[in-house]
């Protein structure tokens, strides 16, 4: 009796079965790899702002400290963004007629907050406290990169959970004296591991690595 299906059908079936299994495994793996790409995390992607603000000029040329504009970073979970009135502390006297600052002057006189665009975005279910990191010797540059060299600010790190955990499991590599928290150019005079170990003991640093530390 002639077979109902030709013999080569077995080969096709085995190939389709193997291909299906590969897809079942590959699709989730590719998806996990995709969400970790800079395209999805936003890393290294300059963010447009309603007013041009060159950190190179304000930080390096004018010597403005990070905490002058982001004063909340040392005392609360949120770093905060500068208000129009804070900017006008300087710009009521310098560049008073610059067309680049028209939006700033309008916001100030109308008492209308400037709608700055957030650069570093964490998922809503992630809790991050700026003040505890600064209090424990983590400098601004560790998470935000060399902002003093950025004409247009971008997200310097992936902000992925693995990146955070790497630091929490080995904080010594990122600790510095509290007096150098906002110093973008600070370099340890001795091996970083040695300096970090001393600072960890001095500031009683015990980073959390359990889920409830960040997911509350």
Image (cartoon, helix red, strand yellow):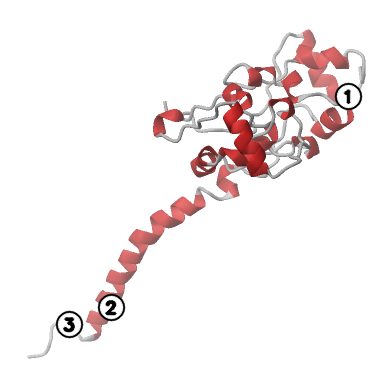
The residue mark sitting in front, 3 or 1, is 1
Q: Is residue 156 visible?
A: no
**Residue 130 in the image: x percent, y percent?**
60, 25
91 sits left or right of 184 in the view: right
Q: Is residue 91 visible?
A: yes
Q: CA distance from mark 3 to mark 2?
A: 11 Å
Closer to the camera, 131 or 187?
A: 187
Is residue 4 placed above or below 152 in the rendered structure?
below
Residue at far bottom of view: 1
The residue mark sitting in front, 3 or 2, is 2
Snapshot quadrant of residue 101: top right
Check residue 99 in the rendering and tell me which mark sits there, or answer none.
1
Residue drawn where x is 74% and y is 25% of the image: 66
| Mark 3 neighbour class, 10 Å CA radius: few under 14, some 14 to 19, many 20 or more | few
| Mark 1 neighbour class, 10 Å CA radius: few under 14, some 14 to 19, many 20 or more | few
Closer to the camera, 101 or 142?
A: 142
């Amino acid at each position: 009796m002639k077979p109902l299906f030709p013999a080569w059908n077995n080969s096709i079936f085995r190939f389709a079965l193997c291909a299906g299994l590969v897809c079942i495994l590959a699709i989730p793996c590719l998806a996990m790899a995709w969400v970790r790409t800079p395209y999805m995390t936003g890393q290294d992607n300059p963010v447009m702002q309603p007013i041009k603000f060159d950190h190179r000029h304000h930080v390096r040329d004018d010597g403005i400290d990070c905490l002058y504009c982001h004063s909340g970073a040392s005392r609360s979970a949120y770093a905060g963004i500068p208000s129009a009135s804070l900017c006008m502390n300087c710009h009521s006297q310098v560049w008073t007629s610059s067309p680049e600052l028209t939006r700033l002057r309008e916001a100030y006189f109308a008492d209308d907050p400037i709608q700055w665009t957030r650069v570093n975005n964490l998922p809503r279910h992630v809790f991050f406290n700026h003040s505890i990191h600064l209090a424990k010797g983590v400098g601004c540059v560790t998470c935000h990169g060399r902002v003093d060299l950025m004409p247009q600010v971008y997200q310097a790190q992936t902000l992925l959970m693995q990146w955070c955990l790497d630091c929490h499991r080995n904080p010594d590599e990122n600790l510095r004296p509290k007096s150098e928290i906002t110093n973008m150019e600070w370099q340890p005079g001795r091996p970083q591991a040695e300096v970090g170990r001393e600072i960890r003991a001095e500031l009683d640093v015990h980073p959390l690595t359990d889920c409830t530390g960040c997911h509350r």
